[in-house]
Amino acid sequence: MLIIISGSAGVGKNTIITHILNNNSDIKLMKTCTTRMPRNTDEDMQSPYIYVSREEFENKIKNGELFEHEEIHNNFYGVLKSSLDEVKKRQCHFIKDIGVLGQINLKRALKNKVEVVSIFLTAPKEELIKRLKARGDHDIDLRISRMEFELSYSKNYDYVIENLNLNKTIKKVESIIKKHEKIEQKRFDKK
């Protein structure tokens, strides 16, 4: 199974993913290649990124190593084809933070191969600004400017959760994962 988590900057995607990873040994992180610089907070959790230079990223595009890629907030993000191959093996579950366009591409590529569940996290704009300031972001206006675009894609997700209470959100996400584990077993473990 692939669990996709999306939402605007500051909504708590990586905090929730870190909790899920720390409490579920059968779920692994599907990493993203990015040209963005690491944040101080990335050291506090299992980083969801493989950090590369812009030149290295462009080489991955040229060499056909990326399944998809997108420019977000002046940085490139992309999914390695080798990561998709790992998910298709179904030896464990994976969780991934991905943009709204990447979510559409991943669901399409993995349809009928593994169970894919997509969760879109939301929070009020004022709350997101507060969280971005607290984590030391300097480009808050840039990050918030993408919010309406991202929200317009929330209808493409299986679940939309407002993340105002972290513990409640985590419980909802864990419940969704358990539900879809059963669905995956029924769909893909038939002999």
Image (spheres, helix red, strand yellow):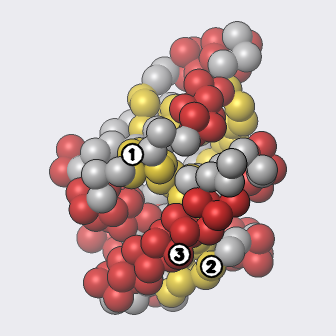
Q: Residues within 10 Å of mark 2 (few under 14, many from 20)?
A: some
Identify which residue is drawn at 53% across, 83% down: 161
Q: Nearer the viewer, mark 2 or mark 3?
A: 3
- Displayed quadrant of residue 117: bottom right
Residue 41 x, y percent position in the rendering: 24, 52
Residue pointed to by mark 2: 159
Residue 68 x, y percent position in the rendering: 72, 36
Counting residues from the start of the chain, the first of labels 2 and 3 encountered is 2
Q: Is residue 188 visible?
A: no
Q: Is residue 69 above or below residue 6?
A: above
- Displayed quadrant of residue 135: bottom left
Q: Residue furthest front?
A: 191
Residue 53 x, y percent position in the rendering: 48, 21
Residue pointed to by mark 1: 28
Residue 39 x, y percent position in the rendering: 30, 46
Task: Residue type at mark 3: give it.
Answer: Lys
The answer to which of 57 and 86 lies nearer the viewer is 86
Counting residues from the start of the chain, the first of labels 1 and 2 encountered is 1
